Image: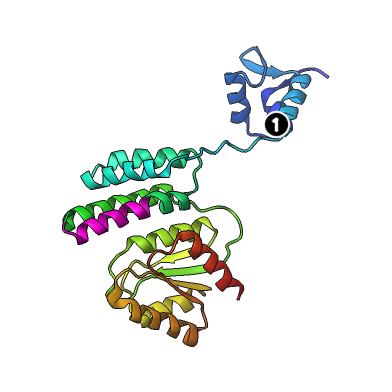
């Protein structure tokens, strides 16, 4: 059998013509140019097909040996408001294949916790704390993932009126999405009736109520109890010191119950 044109070669390889053309240009597929067109030897097509059928090893994932060092670097950039440096630091980890939940748990959450503690002591202004929080919001968008596969369920994430801290709910939403939940993040301070209406409309299988302000912890628990009793949907309430991995485990248990 003689050589075939590049279009036929592409069809035999199961790829678009432009893909085969790119392979020729970069040297991956050997072809001979004849009268302005490319001809490909059948043996070369067989070779390329064999190469494409070989298993591809999974990409190497970077390892972080010292999270405290990365945490300190992120904290320093947040304190001075250097969003570009913070983004470069986080994107380097993301591109290295580091789990976004780990980036949140090991860097973003503790860095903001440290800034919050300094604000409480009067060592950081409210404007600086808000600036750091806004930078972290952008970082979360940068590392957020939506894995393929059947969703575990539908989750609604929000806070009760009086709880205005949005970042914990954002991190909870990121973690749930990374674990293949379909998430409706409502931001903060949603009235009960409106929350229930949406929970029922989207047929949620889980509600997560973030809370950091001790003044609304009781109200948050009452929200959760009412949702479970009146709507029949499991409701998880955040707590101080809880990790994102604990949230994911609790979500799985609630879904299975």
Chief secondary structure of the magenta portion: helix
Question: In the figure, residue 92 lies in which quadrant?
Answer: top left
x, y (%) of residue 245?
50, 59
x, y (%) of residue 63?
51, 39
x, y (%) of residue 78?
26, 47
At label 1, counting other C-alpha atoms closer than 10 Å, the crowd grade (few under 14, some 14-19, many 20 or more) is few
Along the viewing direction, whichever of 72 and 34 lies nearer the viewer? 72
Mark yes or no: residue 99 visible.
Answer: yes
Along the viewing direction, whichever of 114 and 172 lies nearer the viewer? 114
Task: Give above or below for 119 relative to 64.
Answer: below
- Give the residue at x 36% y 39%: 89
Count of numbered circles on the image:
1
Task: Give above or below for 78 relative to 185.
Answer: above
Tell me which colouring the rendered structure shows: rainbow
Label 1 sits on a secondary structure element that is helix
Question: In the figure, residue 197 lies in which quadrant?
Answer: bottom left
Along the viewing direction, whichever of 65 and 232 lies nearer the viewer? 65
* The N terminus lies in quadrant: top right
Q: Farthest residue in the bottom direction? A: 230
- Give the residue at x 44% y 83%: 225
* The C terminus lies in quadrant: bottom right
- Give the residue at x 75% y 23%: 47
**146 magenta-colored:** no
Which residue range is magenta in the image? 108-122
Mark yes or no: residue 161 visible.
Answer: no
**117 magenta-colored:** yes
- Give the residue at x 33% y 50%: 138
According to the picture, the residue beneath numbered tag 1 turns out to be 52
């Amino acid at each position: 059998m003689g050589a075939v044109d590049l279009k036929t070669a592409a069809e035999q390889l199961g790829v678009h013509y432009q893909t085969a053309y790119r392979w020729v240009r970069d040297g991956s597929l050997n072809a001979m140019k004849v009268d302005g067109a490319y001809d490909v030897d059948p043996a070369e097509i067989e070779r390329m097909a064999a190469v494409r059928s070989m298993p591809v090893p999974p990409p190497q994932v970077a390892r972080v040996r010292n999270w405290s060092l990365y945490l300190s670097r992120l904290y320093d950039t947040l304190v001075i408001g250097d969003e570009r440096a913070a983004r470069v630091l986080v994107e380097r980890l993301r591109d290295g294949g580091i789990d976004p939940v780990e980036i949140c748990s090991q860097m973003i959450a503790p860095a903001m916790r440290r800034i919050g503690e300094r604000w409480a002591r009067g060592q950081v202004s409210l404007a600086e704390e808000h600036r750091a929080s806004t930078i972290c919001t952008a970082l979360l968008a940068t590392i957020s993932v939506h894995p393929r596969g059947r969703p575990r369920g539908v989750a609604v994430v929000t806070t009760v009126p009086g709880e205005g801290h949005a970042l914990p709910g954002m991190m909870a939403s990121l973690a749930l999405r990374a674990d293949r939940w379909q998430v409706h993040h409502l931001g903060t301070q949603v009235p009960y009736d409106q929350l229930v209406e949406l929970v029922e409309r989207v047929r949620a299988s889980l509600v997560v109520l973030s809370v950091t302000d001790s003044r609304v912890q009781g109200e948050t628990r009452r929200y959760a109890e009412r949702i479970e009793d009146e709507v029949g949907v499991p409701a998880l309430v955040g707590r101080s010191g809880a990790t994102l991995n604990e949230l994911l485990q609790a979500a799985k248990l609630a879904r299975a119950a």
